[in-house]
Amino acid sequence: MIYLDNAATTRVAPEVLEAMTPFLRDEYGNPSSVYALAGRSAAALQQARQAVADYIGARSDEIVFTGGGSEADNLAIRGTMGKVGDGHMITSPIEHHAVLHTCRALQDEGFELTIVPVDRHGLVDPDEVRKALRPDTRLVTVMHSNNEVGTIQPIAEIAAIAREAGAKLHTDAVQSLGKAPLDVAELGVDMAAFSAHKLHGPKGVGALYVRKGFRPQPQILGGSQESRLRAGTENVPGIVAFGRAVELAAEVGAEAITRMRAQRDRLIDGVMAAIPEVIVSGHPERRLPNIASFLFRYIEGEGILLSLDMRDIAGSSGSACTSGSLDPSHVLLSMGYSHEVAHGSLRLSLSRYTTDEEIDTVLEVLPPIIQRLRDMSPLYPGR
């Protein structure tokens, strides 16, 4: 199979599986206990915490491990806004649903919400954030990069504006980890969410960076784990795997990013040259190196995906989290595309395991698929 849905999830790297296996089998101690078996788990936990911290330019005590990126987003947003239904927050319309749905739920609980617009490329204008700020604004949450079209946001500028107003800045950086420069000090963010399974680690483990000196309210209560910000016995095998995945990204990062960017550009150029009536969505320059997002006029993305699947090629139409929905992508609609055009979306996302031969195969297979679907479409003027 040619797997080009790496923005949805990635294969676990062999080195990552090897690192976590002992903690599934032999090193099963609870890191909160005091005997030697537990001590080895605690040491492995700290090593992984340090690896994640080093990779994003943070301190190890600023890393809180969670059950995934969505939980990290919830801890950041709900933990900052608190439990009293007054106060104001700002977000964008193209956020992952882990952010949007959480903000909407808080709005229902009495908090006030402003959603600033994006342009045709999916880019937030920092001045729109500045205009939306109020004296009671507690939180600005804008994703670092978009999971559907790959647009990278001007987070450092937005963070500086939020800081001047006394608001906290949270960014969902799940898609960016390992694919774009991420230094939390340079960005000036207060919180940033990450997930292991977007980085050739396992599912079910993530992390929230929380700047030293700020303490969101915990959302899971119980024990004193994770600096009392996330109760529950830590997922030691998953966290060890997360740490190893980050170490691997640091080792191969620059080379892998260069290769993915070249493959992505060749994929985009090939599709544009072979297929008429196609739009490349997302920012032309400020974009992740591994995401190619297309809009094919007159057809629906579901038909494209099924046709590709018959050729053992995996892609996506919109985000994997909402692939069961018949509605077009909220991201594309927020960028100004019509329902008709947005329905024809195809996202092909690469990883460091993607080969040039796989790109060649896609460029051979995709054009006749698009033409066949258009020939069957009552909307296609060339029919």
Image (spheres, rainbow, N blue to C red):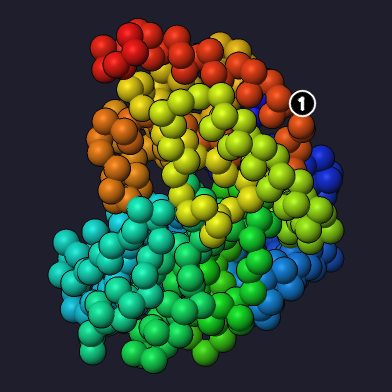
Image point (30%, 74%), residue name: 128
Q: How many marks?
A: 1
Vertical relation: 266 (above or below) 92: above
Residue 68 in view:
no
How crowded is the residue under tag 1: few (<14 C-alpha within 10 Å), some, or many (20+)? few
> Residue 64: x and y, percent?
58, 69
Side (left or right) of 49 relative to 98: right
- Looking at numbered disc 1 in the image, what kind of residue is underneath it? Glu
Side (left or right) of 341 relative to 283: left
Image point (46%, 58%), residue name: 71
Side (left or right) of 235 relative to 88: right
Residue 224, image quadrant = bottom right
Tell which of 80 and 222 is nearer to you.
80
As helix, strand or loop, the secondary structure at mark 1 comes to helix
Tell which of 179 and 83 is nearer to you.
179
Vertical relation: 285 (above or below) 51: above
Circle 1 is placed at which residue position? 357
Quadrant holding the N terminus: top right
Image point (41%, 61%), residue name: 123
Quadrant holding the C terminus: top left
> Residue 284: x and y, percent?
52, 52
Image point (61%, 81%), residue name: 186
Residue 263 in view:
yes
Tell which of 305 and 264 is nearer to you.
264
> Residue 336: x and y, percent?
28, 48
